[in-house]
């Protein structure tokens, strides 16, 4: 089953998916970090947006 991007709930907002380019790109742009660094953080924090943001200074 494909992910319907028009339907979101808090679970979608709470996680960053390494398999979704637009989410990785957003993280890279928002925090001015490389793709490798973004993917490293996603893996380290199991996609937890809150933990990633905290490590990056919460911008």
Image (spheres, rainbow, N blue to C red):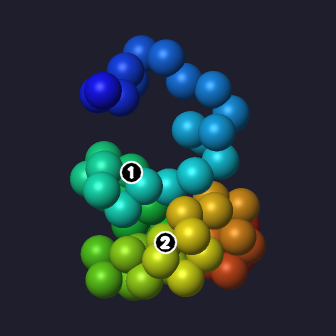
- Asked whether disc 1 touches disc 2, contact meaning CB atoms under 8 Å apart, the reply is no
Taking the view exactly as shown, the residue that stands out farthest to the top is: 6
- Compared across the picture, whether 26 is left or right of 45 comes to left
Q: Which quarter of the rendered picture does the C terminus lie within?
A: bottom right
Displayed quadrant of residue 25: bottom left
Q: Position of residue 31 (x, y in %)?
A: 49, 69
Q: Residue at x 31, y 50 (%)?
A: 20
Of marks 1 and 2, the one in the foreground:
2
Query: Is 28 situated above or below 10?
Result: below
Q: Position of residue 39 (x, y in %)?
A: 38, 75
Query: Is residue 26 in view from this perspective?
Result: no
- Compared across the picture, whether 20 is left or right of 26 comes to left
Q: Secondary structure at mark 1?
A: helix
Query: Is residue 15 in view from this perspective?
Result: yes
Taking the view exactly as shown, the residue that stands out farthest to the front is: 1
Q: Position of residue 23 (x, y in %)?
A: 39, 51
How many numbered marks have been drawn onto this rendered protein structure?
2
Q: Which quarter of the rendered picture does the N terminus lie within?
A: top left
Query: Is 3 situated above or below 34?
Result: above
Q: Which residue is mark 1?
A: 23
Query: Is 34 situated above or below 7?
Result: below
Crowding at label 2, few (<14), some or many (≥20) Cα neighbours within 10 Å? many
Q: Secondary structure at mark 2?
A: helix
Q: Which residue is mark 2?
A: 42
Q: Position of residue 49 (x, y in %)?
A: 62, 59
Instruction: Tell me which label, 1 or 2, sits earlier in the chain.
Output: 1
Crowding at label 1, few (<14), some or many (≥20) Cα neighbours within 10 Å? some
Q: Residue at x 30, y 56 (%)?
A: 19
């Amino acid at each position: 089953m494909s992910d319907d991007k028009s339907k979101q709930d808090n679970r979608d907002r709470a996680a960053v998916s390494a398999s979704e380019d637009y989410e990785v790109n957003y993280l890279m742009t928002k925090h001015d970090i490389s793709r490798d660094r973004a993917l490293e953080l996603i893996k380290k924090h199991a996609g937890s947006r809150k933990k990633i943001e905290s490590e990056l200074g919460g911008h």
